[in-house]
C-alpha cells in the first residue's frame, strides 16, 4: 500500500524557483497590457490624495545604483500609500537642460559646432536629452517602478519652459532679480558661473604664504613706539594668485593687535593671540611685543602693495577670525565674497583682472596672460624678490571644485544676474517656512536652515547655450530692466507655442507691449538678455510646472524624497522659488536618504572598481532582490551594497517565497467562501496564530506610515522563518496531511493559513510587487478578490483576532 495516497500532501504549480530575471519582464508587459496603472487611478478617484513629487534625475547617461535606490524608495512609498486607501498618482520627471548635456553634444559635434547657430546646437541638445530619457525610462520601469511613464514632466517641454520664464519674470516684477558685478564661483574650464549647489569640495595641496605689506601712513602720533621703525602689516593667504587684485587688508574691530619688534629695527603688526604661532612659522625666536593696538586706530590707514605701486587700505570686518593666519586678512574685492562685501561698505570697487579662461588680463603687470593657478609660483617668486615673503609652505586645503568637470574653480567678479535673499525678505520668509515642514530625519531642518540663513544672493545666470534664457528685456541706452504683466504674458505665450528658442529666433519687439518706452530715460530701443538660467531654477519651479498644472495633483506636495545632498540643491531652490512667489513651502514633508557605498563603507568609484551597476544586479538576481536591498536598509544613513549582501538577501527571499509556497500548496483545495471556519470554532493554536498576525500587521502599517521599510523587511522575514516555518506551520503538518480533507481540524488550519497568506502578500506588495502579484494569482478565488494585488489594500487587524489571554498561555508553553 502506498501511504502517500492516504495523505493530503501540498499540491501547487507555484514554482519553487523564482527565476526573477526572466519572469519580471513578462510581468511588466502584462501590467502594461492590462493598463494596471490606469485601473489603479480609476479605482482611487474621490479618495484623499497623497502626492510624492519626483525630483527630476538628469537626462544624461544610464541610471546608477543611487538613482535606482531613490526611485525604488519612491515607488515603495507610492504603492504603500495607495494600499493605505489614498489616491497616490506618481508623475516621474527629468531635468533636461544644462552643462553636462551641452558638453557631451559639444564633444559629439566637434568642429562642426563652429558653423552652427545657437538654435541648431540647442536642437542637438534636445535630441540628446530625449534619447537618454527613453533609455532611463525603460531602466526605471525595469525596477518595477510604477507611474505615469507615458506622460512624464520634462523641463524642456515647451509648456514647462514657458512656466520657467513666467516664474523668472515674477522675480523681476518684484524687483528681486538684479544684475551686479559680484564675485561668484567661476569654472575656467566650463567658462560659466556656478551656483553654490554646483560646487563640490575636495582636498588639494595649496600654497600657504605669509606676506608683508609695508605701512605707508605715519602713525608716530598715535603709536609712538613705531617711530623710526620699518613697520609692516602681515597677511596670510592660500591663494597667491589673488594678490595682484589686492586692494585692502581686513582686521577685526574687536581683536587686540600687537606691534612685534624683531631684529633690524623691523616691526610686524598681527593679532596678539597669534603672535607666538606665527613667529614659529617665520623661524623668528628673538622678538618682543612693544605695543598692543586697538584695531580701530588702524582703520582706513594705508599700506603699500608688496609689488605694485598702489595702496592697500586697512578695513574693519567681523568676518576676520583667529582660526588661522595672522588676523590680518588679504582682501581682493573681486575674488572673494566677504572681501567684496566689506570693500563695498568702504566704497571700494571690485577689481578682477581675470578673463573667462582664468588667465590674467593685459593690465596685470608681470603676470599678464598667465593662468591663475600656474601664476602662483611666479607670484611667490616676485614676493621673494621684493623681500615681502615671510614664510611659504604647502597645506592640505579644502577647495571648491566644479561639479561637472571636477576642476578647481575660482572666485571672480563678473556681471551676473542674482535673486536677492533680502530685498523682499526672501531669506526671512524661507526660514519661517522651514519650521512649518516636517524634516525626516529631523537633522535635515538644521542643515537647510543653516544654509538659507547664511547663503549669499542666488546667482542664477549662466553663460551657456542649452537652457532657458533669463527673460529680461533692458533699455539699450541706460540698462534699466523693462518689465510688466503684458510683457510676461507675451513671453509665456511665445514660449508655450514655440519653446524657449523663440527668445533667440524672434525680435525683441515680439515680446514688448506696443509703444514701449523706457520709464527712466524715455528711450524706445531695447535688448534681450543673452544669459541662461541656472538649471536649479528649472527644477526649482517644478511645483508650478507640475503640481499646479495637473488637476489630479495638489500643491503643496505631501512629500519630497531625495538624497541628503539636495538640502543645498532641489529642496533649496524649490523652497526659494515657492516662498518668493507663493509665500509657502511647496512641500509638507521632506525625506532624505544617504548615499550608496561599498561593503567597506567606501564611496563608489570606477577607478577603485567597486561600482555596482543596477543592470548587472537585475540580470543576476532580479529587480525584486534590488528592491529588497533598498527595503532592508536603514536608508537614512549611507547604504552598503555588495555581492555578498545581495546573496544574503537572495537567501532571505527564498525563505519568504518558500513559506508562501507551502501555504499555497496546503490550501489548494480550500474555498474561503464555503470552507472557512468561524473564529470561535478555530483550534486554539490557530487563534493564537491570528493574534500573532495582528502584531505583524500593526507593525507593518506603522512602519509604512513612518517610512521605516527596514522594520517591515525584518519583521516579515522573522515572521516567515521563525513564527511560521519553524513553529506554526511545522506544527500544522500532521493536521494538514493526516486529517480528513474536509474535517474542521484541517479547515481550521486552512482558514488561518489563507488569512496569513492574504496578509503577508499585501504587506510585501509595495516592496516586492513582482512576487506578490505572482502569489496572488495562485491564491483561491473569491467574489471580492481584486484583479491584481496592487488594486488591494493593506491588511487591517480584526479586533476579534486579538486574544491576550490565549497569547500568554501559548507564550508560556513555548518558553518551556
Image: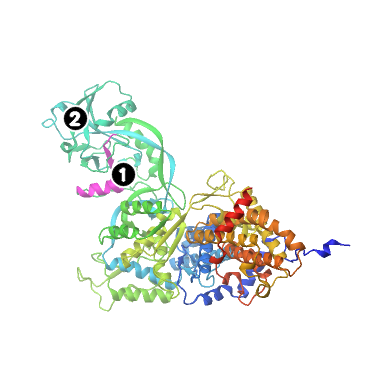
State the image quarter where residue 730 is shown. bottom right
Q: Is residue 608 visible?
A: yes
- Identify the secondary structure beneath mark 2: strand
Label number found at residue 36: none
Horizontally, is 80 left or right of 498 in the view? Answer: right
* Magenta stretch: includes residue 341: yes
Assess disc 1: are there few (<14), some (14-19) or many (≥20) residues with their C-alpha within 10 Å of its C-alpha: some
Horizontally, is 258 left or right of 784 in the view? Answer: left
Measured from the top left, where is residue 810 in percent x and y?
Answer: 61, 55
Circle 1 is placed at which residue position? 364
Label number found at residue 292: 2
> Is residue 409 or residue 618 the one in the foreground?
618
Query: What residue appears at the point 42 percent right and 77 percent down from the top-left corner?
Result: 497
- Identify the secondary structure beneath mark 1: loop
Q: Against 783, is 579 above or below?
A: above
Assess disc 2: are there few (<14), some (14-19) or many (≥20) residues with their C-alpha within 10 Å of its C-alpha: some
The mark lying in front, picked from 1 and 2, is 2
> Is residue 382 or residue 765 the one in the foreground?
765
Q: Which residues are magenta?
A: 326-346
* Magenta stretch: includes residue 525: no
Measured from the top left, where is residue 761 in percent x and y?
Answer: 61, 64
Q: Is residue 462 visible?
A: no
State the image quarter where residue 600 is shown. top right
In this view, which residue lies farthest toward the left? 221
Q: How many numbered marks does the figure carry?
A: 2
Amino acid at each position: 500500500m502506498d501511504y502517500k495516497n492516504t495523505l493530503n500532501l501540498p499540491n501547487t504549480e507555484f514554482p519553487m524557483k523564482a527565476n526573477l530575471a526572466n519572469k519580471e519582464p513578462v510581468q511588466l508587459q502584462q501590467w502594461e497590457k492590462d493598463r494596471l496603472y490606469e485601473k489603479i487611478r480609476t479605482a482611487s478617484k474621490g479618495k484623499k490624495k497623497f502626492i510624492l513629487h519626483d525630483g527630476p534625475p538628469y537626462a544624461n547617461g544610464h541610471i546608477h545604483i543611487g538613482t535606482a535606490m531613490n526611485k525604488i524608495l519612491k515607488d515603495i512609498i507610492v504603492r504603500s500609500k495607495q494600499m493605505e486607501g489614498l489616491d497616490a498618482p506618481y508623475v516621474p520627471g527629468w531635468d533636461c537642460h544644462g552643462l553636462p548635456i551641452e558638453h557631451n553634444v559639444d564633444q559629439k559635434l566637434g568642429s562642426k559646432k563652429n558653423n552652427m547657430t545657437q538654435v541648431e546646437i540647442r536642437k542637438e541638445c534636445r535630441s540628446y536629452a530625449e534619447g537618454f530619457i527613453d533609455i532611463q525610462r525603460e531602466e526605471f520601469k525595469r525596477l518595477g517602478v510604477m507611474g505615469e511613464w507615458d506622460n512624464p514632466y520634462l523641463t524642456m517641454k515647451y509648456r514647462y519652459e514657458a512656466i520657467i520664464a513666467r516664474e523668472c519674470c515674477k522675480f523681476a516684477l518684484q524687483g528681486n532679480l538684479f544684475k551686479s558685478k559680484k564675485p561668484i564661483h567661476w569654472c575656467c574650464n566650463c567658462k560659466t558661473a556656478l551656483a553654490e549647489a554646483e560646487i563640490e569640495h575636495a582636498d588639494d595641496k595649496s600654497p600657504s604664504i605669509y606676506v608683508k605689506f609695508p605701512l605707508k601712513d605715519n602713525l608716530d602720533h598715535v603709536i609712538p613706539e613705531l617711530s623710526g621703525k620699518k613697520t609692516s602689516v602681515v597677511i596670510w593667504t592660500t591663494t597667491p594668485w589673488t594678490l595682484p587684485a589686492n586692494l585692502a587688508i581686513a582686521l577685526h574691530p574687536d581683536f587686540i593687535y600687537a606691534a612685534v619688534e624683531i631684529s633690524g629695527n623691523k616691526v610686524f603688526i598681527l593679532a596678539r593671540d597669534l603672535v607666538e604661532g606665527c613667529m614659529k612659522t617665520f623661524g623668528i625666536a628673538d622678538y618682543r611685543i612693544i605695543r598692543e593696538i586697538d584695531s580701530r586706530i588702524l582703520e582706513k590707514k594705508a599700506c603699500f602693495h608688496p609689488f605694485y605701486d598702489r595702496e592697500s587700505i586697512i578695513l574693519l570686518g567681523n568676518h576676520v577670525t583667529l582660526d588661522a593666519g595672522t588676523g590680518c586678512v588679504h582682501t581682493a574685492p573681486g575674488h572673494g565674497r566677504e572681501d567684496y562685501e566689506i570693500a563695498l561698505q568702504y566704497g571700494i570697487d571690485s577689481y578682477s583682472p581675470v578673463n573667462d579662461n582664468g588667465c590674467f588680463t593685459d593690465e596685470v603687470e608681470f603676470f599678464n596672460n598667465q593662468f591663475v593657478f600656474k601664476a602662483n609660483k611666479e607670484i611667490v617668486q616676485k614676493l621673494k624678490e621684493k623681500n615681502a615673503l615671510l614664510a611659504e609652505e604647502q597645506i592640505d586645503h579644502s577647495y571648491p571644485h566644479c561639479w561637472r568637470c571636477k576642476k578647481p574653480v575660482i572666485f571672480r567678479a563678473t556681471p551676473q544676474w542674482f535673486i536677492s535673499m533680502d530685498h523682499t525678505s526672501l531669506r526671512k520668509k524661507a526660514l519661517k517656512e522651514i519650521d512649518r515642514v516636517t524634516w525626516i530625519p529631523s537633522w535635515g531642518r538644521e542643515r537647510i536652515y543653516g544654509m538659507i540663513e547664511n547663503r549669499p544672493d542666488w546667482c542664477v545666470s549662466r553663460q551657456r547655450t542649452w537652457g532657458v534664457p533669463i527673460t529680461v528685456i533692458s533699455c539699450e541706452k541706460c540698462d534699466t530692466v523693462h518689465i510688466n504683466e503684458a510683457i510676461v504674458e507675451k513671453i509665456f505665450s511665445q514660449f508655450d507655442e514655440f519653446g524657449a528658442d523663440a527668445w533667440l529666433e524672434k525680435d525683441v519687439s515680439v515680446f514688448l507691449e506696443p509703444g514701449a518706452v523706457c520709464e527712466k530715460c524715455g528711450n524706445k530701443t531695447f535688448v534681450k538678455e543673452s544669459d541662461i538660467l541656472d538649471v536649479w531654477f528649472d527644477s526649482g519651479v517644478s511645483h508650478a510646472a507640475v503640481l499646479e498644472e495637473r488637476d489630479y495633483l495638489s500643491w503643496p506636495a505631501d512629500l519630497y524624497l531625495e538624497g541628503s545632498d539636495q538640502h543645498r540643491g532641489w529642496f533649496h531652490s524649490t523652497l526659494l522659488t515657492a516662498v518668493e512667489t507663493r509665500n509657502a513651502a511647496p512641500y509638507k514633508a521632506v525625506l532624505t536618504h544617504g548615499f550608496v557605498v561599498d561593503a567597506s563603507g567606501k564611496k563608489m568609484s570606477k577607478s577603485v572598481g567597486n561600482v555596482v551597476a543596477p543592470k548587472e544586479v537585475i540580470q543576476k538576481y532580479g529587480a525584486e532582490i534590488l528592491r529588497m536591498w533598498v527595503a532592508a536598509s536603514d536608508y537614512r544613513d549611507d547604504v552598503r551594497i555588495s555581492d555578498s549582501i545581495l546573496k544574503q538577501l537572495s537567501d532571505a527571499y527564498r525563505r519568504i517565497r518558500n513559506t508562501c509556497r507551502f501555504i499555497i500548496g496546503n490550501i489548494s483545495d480550500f474555498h474561503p467562501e464555503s470552507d472557512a471556519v468561524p473564529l470561535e470554532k478555530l483550534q486554539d493554536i490557530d487563534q493564537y496564530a491570528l493574534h500573532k498576525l495582528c502584531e505583524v500587521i500593526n507593525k507593518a502599517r506603522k512602519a509604512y506610515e513612518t517610512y521605516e521599510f527596514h522594520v517591515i523587511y525584518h519583521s516579515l522575514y522573522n515572521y516567515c522563518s521563525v513564527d511560521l516555518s519553524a513553529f506554526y506551520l511545522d506544527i500544522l503538518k500532521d493536521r494538514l496531511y493526516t486529517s480528513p480533507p474536509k474535517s474542521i481540524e484541517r479547515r481550521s488550519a486552512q482558514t488561518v493559513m489563507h488569512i496569513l497568506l492574504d496578509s503577508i502578500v499585501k504587506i510585501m506588495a509595495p516592496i516586492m510587487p513582482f512576487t506578490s502579484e505572482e502569489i496572488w494569482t495562485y491564491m483561491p478565488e473569491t467574489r471580492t478578490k481584486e484583479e491584481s494585488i496592487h488594486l488591494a489594500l493593506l491588511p487591517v487587524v480584526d479586533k476579534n483576532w486579538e486574544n491576550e489571554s490565549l497569547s500568554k498561555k501559548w507564550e508560556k508553553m513555548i518558553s518551556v
